Amino acid sequence: MTSSQVVLELRDVQKSFGSVVALRSGTIAVESGSIHALVGENGAGKSTLVKIVAGLYQRDAGTFQLGGEDVNFTSTAQSKAAGVAVIYQEPTLFPDLSVTENIFMGRQPTNRFGRINRAAMRDEAKALFARLGVNIDPDRPAEGLSIADQQVIEIAKAVSLNARVLIMDEPTAALSGVEVDRLFAIARSLRDEGRGLMFISHRFDEVFALCDKVTVMRDGSYIATNLISETTVDALVQQMVGREVTELFPKQEAVIGEPVLVVEDLESPGIFHDISFTVRSGEIVGLAGLVGAGRSEVARAVFGVDKYKSGRVTVDGKTVKPGSPVAAMQAGLALIPEDRRKQGLVVDSGVGENITSVILNQLTKLGVINGRKQHDEAREWATKLEVKAQALDTIAGTLSGGNQQKVVIAKWLATNPKLLIIDEPTRGIDVGTKSEVHRLLSQLAGTGMGILMISSELPEVLGMADRVLVMHEGRISQEIDRSQATSESVMRAATGAVTVVL
């Protein structure tokens, strides 16, 4: 570290929305020349605290200081002008503008005639990328850039504004391993320049690899701050949830029966090739691989969302019509997509409406929905999955990420599927809810349901799967039994170091 000066400090900050208390005692002190993690379950108050720092919300009480001076931002513009930059999980760039134009939007340098000096702007963009150690074409349009490159552009913008504090909010959720390594290298270089960084993540391996200190929040309140070198994962988990989570991967023994899903020679040119595998009743099959390997595309094709050129999908020995989600559902398939907000939820509708949205035909008579049946069905599944919502008409988009995921799972379980395809089951949710989702998947397998689980988190794959199918560049490179699956064996197959023709 280059300095130990506190550059950002919040003490006992409070924020309420009507009768709902979002933040009871938000407290954190970020030092210049350090990376400070902020962890907690969904609903712990992390996002509210960040939004206060970013100027989106104003606190009701407590102390908020930047560089030792009291501040009270009433807009994001004030926060940025004071030297605060927030790098979100999914940046919002202007897609039709170039990389350079996005960096300097609203503050373009001009020449002596008052015209935008594009050459100077481009040169500065190149210098920023060189400083960050990345190679991005400053002239290319922002549209089509990877999430990782978009985040780098946001960081370059922050550096150009000489931001004193950078807040990274779940920045690695959609990144590959190589992209995460690049982001961490940039974060460390910014720390070494003397900037203060706040890093928010549910991934403990990243917190311990990157950060110097960690602050824990629970139920809107400050719990503790620890030096990374003086704490453990178990200690953090206990502080986060207020109890011991003894089993993050509560894998139960299940009777593995006959094949439920059989995929044969599935082909989609340029996307995936020669995809063949089987999922049996009572079995959890993990589909692993790096981002871009084609895992989600295979799942979408099996469920009929995307079409494929050749091959066959059968459920209980019966061929499923290609390119038809309705046919897939009728055959007994269910798909919980990776992006729950865009593809799994109607965020502006209530919890109950979301849960019953795919079984309305079972609740309708003569074109009229039986409201009582709909309510009872929604309540049953919300109770089974322990969805934390004030009422069934609570707007789904207002729930925490973990509870949104539970609503999506409840919706598809209500269809009574034979096989559940679940894509990134615990992405962006806290450790306590992760354990609940894992326990649910294990229980479903115990009832005889087949499960195809796609995950980018190796511990999740190794902890939950009976077999692991590893994809590399659109092909299944290896099938690994649970007893033989290790981080090393899966990563070798995911990077193409092992290729086995099945």
Image (cartoon, rainbow, N blue to C red):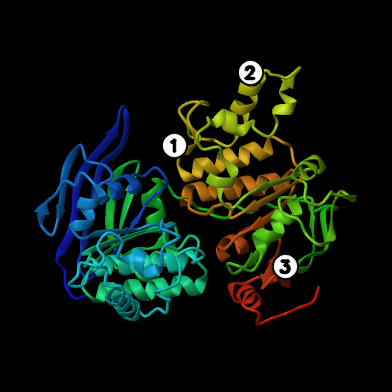
Helix, strand or loop at label 1? It is helix
Q: Give the quarter of the image for residue 473.
A: bottom right
The residue tagged 3 is 272
The picture places residue 252, in percent across and down from the top left corner, at: 66, 51
The disc placed on residue 371 is: 2
The answer to whether 490 appears left or right of 82 in the picture is right
Cα–Cα span, label 3 and label 2: 44 Å
Vertical comparison of 350 with 186: above or below: above
Q: Give the quarter of the image for residue 184.
A: bottom left
The picture places residue 273, in percent across and down from the top left corner, at: 76, 69
Helix, strand or loop at label 2? It is helix
- Dot placed on the residue nearer the N-terminal end, 3 or 1: 3
The residue tagged 1 is 398
Q: Residue at x 64, y 30 (%)?
A: 356
The picture places residue 161, in percent across and down from the top left corner, at: 23, 66
Cα–Cα span, label 3 and label 1: 36 Å
| Residue 152 seen in this snapshot | no
Crowding at label 1, few (<14), some or many (≥20) Cα neighbours within 10 Å?
Answer: some
Which amino acid type corresponds to the residue marked 1 in the rendered image? Thr
Vertical comparison of 311 with 477: above or below: above
